Amino acid sequence: MVQNGAVTTAPDESAVAAALRAAGARFAFVHGSRATGRGARPDSDLDVGAWWGADPPASWTVEVPDRVDLVVLDQAPLWLAGRIAQHGRLLFDDDPPTRVRWQADTRLRYLDDLPALRERRTRGLLGYAKGRHG
C-alpha cells in the first residue's frame, strides 16, 4: 500500500514463498529486521534467504515480488549464511531433513568461525580508521 507517497506494508510473504517454490527453492528464511521484529520500518524490504540444493540460480534471475532482497543460500558466504541459519525465521520448508542438515551444519561452521570473522572485521575497521586518520 502507498500512503502519502510512502510504502506502508511489507511484501506478502505467501506470494514470496510461492514465487520461490515456483523457481525450485526447497526452503527459505526471512532474515534481517523483519525476522527479528527490531528496526523494521513500514517501508522496509523483506530480506529472504532461499536454498535450492541443485543448480541454484543467480539471485537476480529469480522472479520475486518488489521490495524483496533475495540471498541464494547455496552460494552465500559463511558470515551471511550463518547469520541466516542462526537468526532467520522459517518462511517455508518443503524438505525438512535437508533443511535441518543445512541449518545445523551452517550454524556449527559459523559458530566455529565466528571468532575469526570478528577478528577480520576488527582488523579491517582498524585499518580503515588508520588510513583515514593516520
Image: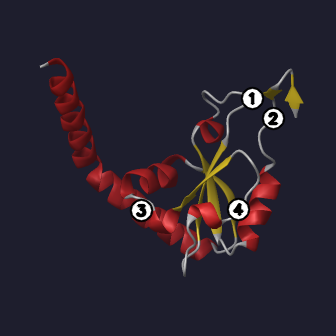
**Image coords of residue 55 (percent x, y):** 54, 80
The residue beneath circle 3 is: 106
The residue beneath circle 2 is: 9
Dot 1 or dot 3, earlier in sequence: 1
Dot 4 or dot 1, earlier in sequence: 1
Mark 4 near mark 3, Cβ–Cβ under 8 Å? no
Measure the alpha-carbon separation of dots 4 and 2: 20 Å
Q: Quadrant of residue 81?
A: bottom left
The residue beneath circle 4 is: 92
**Image coords of residue 13 (percent x, y):** 77, 51
Q: The residue tagged with tag 4: helix, strand or loop?
A: strand
Dot 2 or dot 1, earlier in sequence: 2
The residue beneath circle 1 is: 42
Nearer the viewer's eye, disc 1 or disc 3?
1
Q: Nearer the viewer, residue 36 or 69?
A: 69
Vertical relation: 97 (above or below) 20: below
**Image coords of residue 8 (percent x, y):** 81, 29
Nearer the viewer's eye, disc 4 or disc 2?
2
Amino acid type at mark 2:
Thr
Amino acid type at mark 4:
Phe
Q: The residue tagged with tag 1: helix, strand or loop?
A: loop
Measure the alpha-carbon separation of dots 3 and 2: 32 Å
Amino acid type at mark 3:
Thr
Q: Nearer the viewer, residue 106 or 51?
A: 51
Mark 3 near mark 2, Cβ–Cβ under 8 Å? no
Amino acid type at mark 1:
Pro
Q: The residue tagged with tag 2: helix, strand or loop?
A: loop
Nearer the viewer's eye, disc 3 or disc 2?
2
